[in-house]
Image (cartoon, rainbow, N blue to C red):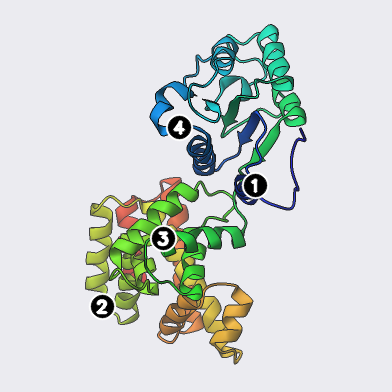
Amino acid sequence: MAGNFNKKDHAFKTFNTDLKEDNFPPVIFMYGVEEYLIDWAAGCLVNRFVNPGTKSLDYVKLSDDTAGADMVLEACNTFSMFSERRVVWAKEFAPLRAVNPKGFTQSDKEKLLEYASNPNEGTLLILSSSEIEEKSELVKELKKICRCYDFDKLDYSALMGFAEKRFRAAGVQINRDVLKYMVDETGYFNKETEYRILNLENDIKKVIAHSDGMIIREEDVSATLNGDLDTFVFNFLDAVSNNKKDIAFTLLHNILAAGSDVFSVTGLLVNHFELILEVKEFKQDGMNLNAITSIMKMHEFRIKKAMAFADKFTVEKLKNILTQLYEIDRNIKTGALEQSMALELMVGRI
């Protein structure tokens, strides 16, 4: 039994291929940050091999941190009643997450590895953990002798495919451009993000609920993913660009009263004014929407909005606003100014 498969393919794809070919050895090792995919894959295996009528007998899920090697092996060595294979799933298995896990001895490790090398063919054992300790000898050995699926983050193409299938399954239409906009707006590929497929699944449901139930539009995605803060930013920009400072003050008080974090508000304003300034400078260089979108590698929807506000400010004014924002952000963080006062001061200076 080989370890990892073709490293060019994500585990999501290789698992789907194995599922179609009914190609699964008696011991499988699943890991990776996408817990949703681990749960999905384990669920597929249970549905494939376990008779629904005897599920309570032929399917054992051990998700307690105290589940030890003896408990796992006892479950594996019990033969199935009426299912094609008995499925035993040790989920978030503690010995996979530490070099020397509490209560797990060298003897336990040896017994598990011995079983993995000579398993009960009538049982399918799934060992899984969203986080694994790469230095663990157990992990190293399991990678050598077991079928492994590393459910790391999906690449862009796979994530687009995943989302597209979910919309299709719900019976709603979404064109490729709007789907791309949604994927971009989730921030899934940001380095520090904790946004996962489970979050995407939930956001897809919210977007569908916000739509007319037939076609997903950019407005549905924007209103759902960006929510109150994004609505605030564009209303705020509209107010300050038209010199309606009383409205800007009201919007600011409302968003803070609703529980939004001051740093999130200032950070969002900085990001939007930086974008508007960049778009403004590109426009002055004679670039059109397509050229700016290509250079900035952002969705056209965001660039269009920025272009609308860019026409209402001079470059000098935008640079001055950003200078004020940087200074206020610094003063808030250092405690030189009280937070709400600093933001009110900012509105007064814009």
Residue 21's label in the rendered image is 1
Which residue does the image show at 57% across and 79% down from the upper left?
293
Q: Are marks 3 and 4 in contact (CB under 8 Å)?
A: no
Which residue does the image show at 74% across and 39% down from the upper left?
4
Label 3, on which residue?
Answer: 169
| Spatial CA span between label 1 and label 2 | 64 Å
Task: Name the quarter where the N terminus is drawn.
Answer: top right
The kind of residue on which mark 4 rests is Asn
Q: Are marks 1 and 4 in contact (CB under 8 Å)?
A: no
Query: In the displayed structure, would residue 288 be above or below residue 200?
Result: below
Question: Of tags 3 and 4, which is closer to the observer?
Answer: 4
Query: In the displayed structure, would residue 156 be above or below residue 307?
Result: above
Tell which circle, 1 or 4, labels the residue nearer the N-terminal end.
Answer: 1
Tell which circle, 1 or 2, labels the residue nearer the N-terminal end.
Answer: 1
Tell which circle, 1 or 3, labels the residue nearer the N-terminal end.
Answer: 1
Q: Quadrant of residue 155?
A: bottom right
Secondary structure beneath dot 2 equals loop
Q: Nearer the viewer, residue 253 or 307?
A: 307
Which residue does the image show at 30% across and 54% down from the upper left?
340
In this view, which residue lies farthest toward the bottom?
A: 286
| Spatial CA span between label 1 and label 3 | 23 Å
Label 2, on which residue?
Answer: 244
| Spatial CA span between label 2 and label 4 | 67 Å
Secondary structure beneath dot 4 equals loop
Query: In the displayed structure, would residue 249 be above or below residue 135?
Result: below
Tell which circle, 2 or 4, labels the residue nearer the N-terminal end.
Answer: 4
